[in-house]
Image (spheres, rainbow, N blue to C red):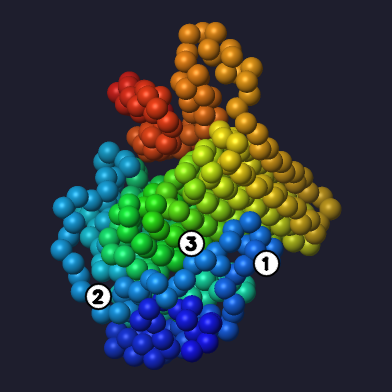
Amino acid sequence: MTTEMKQVPAGLSRETIERLARERGEPEWHIQRRLEAFERFLQLPMPSPKQEDWRYTDITTLHLEDYPAVAWGGTELGVPPQTMPAFLTDHPTIRVVHRVGFGFEAEIPDALQQKGVQVRDLREVLIQNPEQLQEDLGRLAPLPGDKFSFLHTACWDTGLYVYLPPNVEVEGVIEIIHWFETPGAHFPHTVIVAEPNSRANIVQSFFSPEEAPVLAVGAVEVFNRANSDLRHAIVQRMGRASVFLTSVDYEQKRDSRVLSLAVGLGAKLARTVLQHLMTEPGAEARPLGVFFGDDDQHLDFRTLQDHRVGHTTSDLLYKGVLDDSAVSVFSGMIRVHPRAQHTDAYQANRNLILSGEAQAYSIPNLEIGANEVRCTHGATVGPVQPDEVFYLRSRGLDPETAEALLVMGFFEVVLREIKPADLRLSIQRLLASKLKGNAAQYFMDLAELDESILVEA
């Protein structure tokens, strides 16, 4: 067996994929798509730091054969765990618990069901209504030449289909918990369709047990039709023994608006590739990100603001804090295609370093093919400023609390854009929980106090 063939999750083969896909009743066009992607996956080498896209993220020590492909290996449905991760919002309008690899439960109010709002099993849609997916499924997610992207296309095994009908506004939050309870390799896929004039706030949280060796290779495809308005958050809270690799792609039609939020907190290695593809005039994108790495975590973010036509707008802000020997990578690209005149795009990445061993790599890029545009970018990496700490200490704060106050203030410019209030405060508590010493509990208690007095505008 060649080295390349060994780099396959245990239990996966062309024969297994074809057999199980046929047994499950998948349409022929999708089976062939799987098999073609699997062949491409086998042909490509593992990414290495010699490739520009992986220059600062060394994944060559990852041995895929150590991760059994859970949903392809006949793993039986286990007993539901005694405790499940908590929802980030107090009262989600739609509650979804997705036991990755096994199924999900969704609580949708009758009034929204009558309006046509759907949360369905993606494979069920593929089998029962293949015409709804044939044109779009996998159209955004594959990253050209990326080995893990082909692996996902070949092997996605579980997923959700979220449908927002035309002219429907979902008040409150649609919150989805993705729970990776079983060690091994998982390939979740989410498709979100926001029809014209629809409006919603969707939060996807990704969890795994702290010590479970989980490999998650996922994708989220979001189709934003004309004049749709979407807030969408990806909150990564995987256990420290996990590897989390995902792509998030937004196709934005005329006058659509998307505020995306990427939150990076868990995993030993996490890589998120997020792309806003603005294909018609009037599209607006507001990509936001916050991350906090500690111990030896490695958090990698790749973003693309892709202006394919003119009169489109994007404004990106990612802020990260690193402690101990953690490493972060931010690589952002603003791409303006020829004739995409009157594009307005901005990109900023700010990084705060709390220790001498932590490292932050920030690589903002511009690729401009039109001349009547306004495009700028910027990046900063630096430690907490001693004069700022001194000022706070002169007001009676100890060094630990002074540094913590500066860290939480650093995140505030992003946190204030998160809605509703209970989601913002939950993310604030998660960030504060990574502070060291007594300061962590102080800011978590402060969030509780804020929640008790805050009235959402």
Residue type marked 1: Gln
Residue drawn at point x = 28 percent, y = 64 percent: 182
Which comes sooner in the sequence, label 3 or label 2? 2
From the viewer's perspective, is residue 266 above or below residue 99?
A: above
Residue drawn at point x = 60 percent, y = 50 percent: 329
Residue type marked 2: Thr
Q: Secondary structure at mark 2?
A: loop
Could you tell me residue 104's position as x and y percent? 25, 63
- Residue at image mark 2: 75
Which comes sooner in the sequence, label 3 or label 1? 1
Which comes sooner in the sequence, label 2 or label 1? 1
Q: Nearer the viewer, mark 3 or mark 1?
A: 1
Could you tell me residue 388's position as x and y percent? 60, 18
Of residues 347 and 330, the one drawn nearer to the viewer in this rendering: 330
Q: Residues within 10 Å of mark 3 (few under 14, many from 20)?
A: many
- Residue at image mark 1: 51
Residue 97: image quadrant is bottom left
Residue type marked 3: Leu
- Residue at image mark 3: 245
Residue drawn at point x = 27 percent, y = 51 percent: 95
Q: Secondary structure at mark 1?
A: loop
Q: Secondary structure at mark 3?
A: strand
Q: Is residue 224 visible?
A: no
